[in-house]
Amino acid sequence: MTTRTLKIILAGVLGAFALYIYFFPPNTGTDVVVVDEKNDTIKAQIDSTSLLCMDFKDYNPSTLNTGLIRDMVEIYKANQLQSIQGSTTNPITNDAYSVWFDLDTIKKFIYHIEKGVQKNSSRSEKLGLRFYYGAYPKKMFWGKANGYEDLEEFLKDPVKVSYENKHTIVMMPTIDNGGKIIDFNPFDKNTYSSGIAKPTSQFNGEPSNDPNSQIPVMALTGTGGSSNNETDPQKRTAARNHGNLIPPGDPTILSF
């Protein structure tokens, strides 16, 4: 075989390789290929930087025996709930003892926590969720004109309009800051080390005039909530949407 022939063959191989690379670019490490295992074909190729929720298929789901769940709920009803409803100073009639969120709301909440951290931190952060016990303020303060804009929609809902003073939870994102688990705003890098500035409270359900109380943060509480398209991290953090309370919702749908 002559040198000229070898050069022609080599040029052909390189040309074929170049065409292959052009039409079938290699995976750069940021792409994830989704394969249809049944037909052994590629279904999709997506950017892995958009994949925030991890795959936990190798972990067993967390479980509790139904008997334990039932007893825990009944203990709460017999002690804490009775104390709330039977208080001689400030009784709350027919107080809520469950809060419901649809799964998509929880997924979106976690997604935006991780998305904010991905944008503002280059290291792997230890994140979590903190649940605060709370109660809805007096209805006279609901709505934009009265102080609590986030509760505007409740005034139009025949069930949620009864949420006044009802027990609920508020879900806040947390970050590990040197061993201290602090509340933070994923969209405000300043809170990663100092946490969220604590606002003052009137302790009577009346909106506070403290500027720190006017900063919306990323949170979920017990469906409503205003649309939140604010991009200024000083004005929007991660706390808003509301879950459904029972009571005043229908308690016959509950298992416990």
Image (spheres, rainbow, N blue to C red):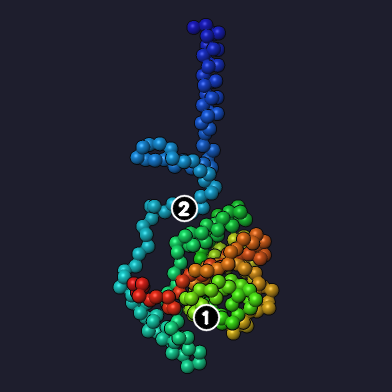
Please state which of residues 4 and 135 is positioned toward the viewer in this rendering: 135
Residue 125 can be seen in this image: no
The residue tagged 1 is: 164
Please state which of residues 253 and 63 is positioned toward the viewer in this rendering: 253
Please state which of residues 156 and 136 is positioned toward the viewer in this rendering: 156
Q: Residues within 10 Å of mark 2 (few under 14, many from 20)?
A: few
In this view, the residue farthest toward the bottom is 88
The residue located at (63%, 78%) in the rendering is: 146
Q: Nearer the viewer, mark 1 or mark 2?
A: 1
Q: Residues within 10 Å of mark 1 (few under 14, many from 20)?
A: some
Residue type (three-letter) at the residue carrying disc 1: Glu
Residue 221 can be seen in this image: yes
The residue located at (44%, 78%) in the rendering is: 248
The residue located at (30%, 73%) in the rendering is: 67
The residue located at (47%, 76%) in the rendering is: 159
Image quadrant occupied by the C terminus: bottom left
Residue 247 at x, y = what percent?
43, 78
In this view, the residue farthest toward the top is 2
Indicate whether 223 appears above or below 71.
Answer: above
The residue tagged 2 is: 54
Residue type (three-letter) at the residue carrying disc 2: Met
SS at mark 1 in the image: loop
Which image quadrant for residue 56? bottom left
SS at mark 2 in the image: loop
Residue 23 at x, y = what percent?
52, 29
Left or right: residue 228 versus residue 91 is right
The first of marks 1 and 2 along the sequence is: 2
- Disc 1 and disc 2: Cα gap in Å? 38 Å
User: Are dots 1 and 2 in contact, CB under 8 Å?
Assistant: no
Residue 38 at x, y = what percent?
34, 40
